[in-house]
Image: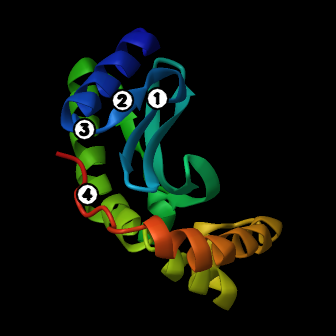
Amino acid sequence: MNIKKLESAFLNSLIKNFDSWVFKENERSFRKRVNNINWYFHITHAQFGEYFEASADVAIEFLDKGNQVCIIGAQLYNIDGAGYKSFPVKSIIGAKISAFRLKRYFKKVGLPFLQKYSDPELVLSTLKKGGREADLISPIPETQKADIVKLDAFVSIAYNQSFNSTPKSGAN
């Protein structure tokens, strides 16, 4: 089967289930904006001849007046802590099944992550504390240090002025 047809069937099945999100085809990512936050659900895949395996990550981008303050995120399987998990796509039917399973996995693992870490004060305290959880949401130490500085300023100024609610809804 043609990989492009399989990928199209897989992504079209996902798009139908994320109708309140904006899909950017060239990035294979979904974005949902609420207040000063962008949520991202990004699809990756590894091709193996006539089929591919999809996996996904989620990210949260904090914004101040439309400008990025910082972005944190993780692979769904790292959040879950269960080791590498992918969704094989070998046929059109398999594309629909894998899309359904990935959406269910997103709701179980990705959506709670997005909801939890949409609080910049929690992200800031997690990064300051360091350790496994900080490495999960921001795996590069230099990035963690820069994010702490940016989030500290954001939380103390912009957050208190304009950050009124944390998004709670996910995929439809």
| Helix, strand or loop for disc 2 | strand
Q: In this rendering, is residue 45 above or below 142?
A: above
Q: Can residue 168 be seen from the camera position used here? A: yes
Which residue is found at the position 50% from the left and 81% from the top? Answer: 122
Q: Would you call the spot at circle 1 few (<14 residues within 10 Å), some (14-19), or many (20 or more)?
A: many
Closer to the chain start, of discs 2 and 1, is 1
Q: Residue furthest front?
A: 161
| Helix, strand or loop for disc 3 | loop
Distance Cα–Cα, label 4 vs label 3: 11 Å
Q: Amino acid at mark 4?
A: Lys
**Image coords of residue 50 (percent x, y):** 46, 17
What residue would you read off at disc 2? 89
Count of marks, rendered view? 4
What residue would you read off at disc 4? 107
Distance Cα–Cα, label 1 vs label 4: 22 Å
Of tags 1 and 3, the one toward the viewer is: 3
Of tags 2 and 4, the one toward the viewer is: 4
Closer to the chain start, of discs 4 and 3, is 3
Closer to the chain start, of discs 1 and 4, is 1
What residue would you read off at disc 1? 52
Q: Amino acid at mark 1?
A: Phe
Which residue is found at the position 78% from the left and 74% from the top? Answer: 145
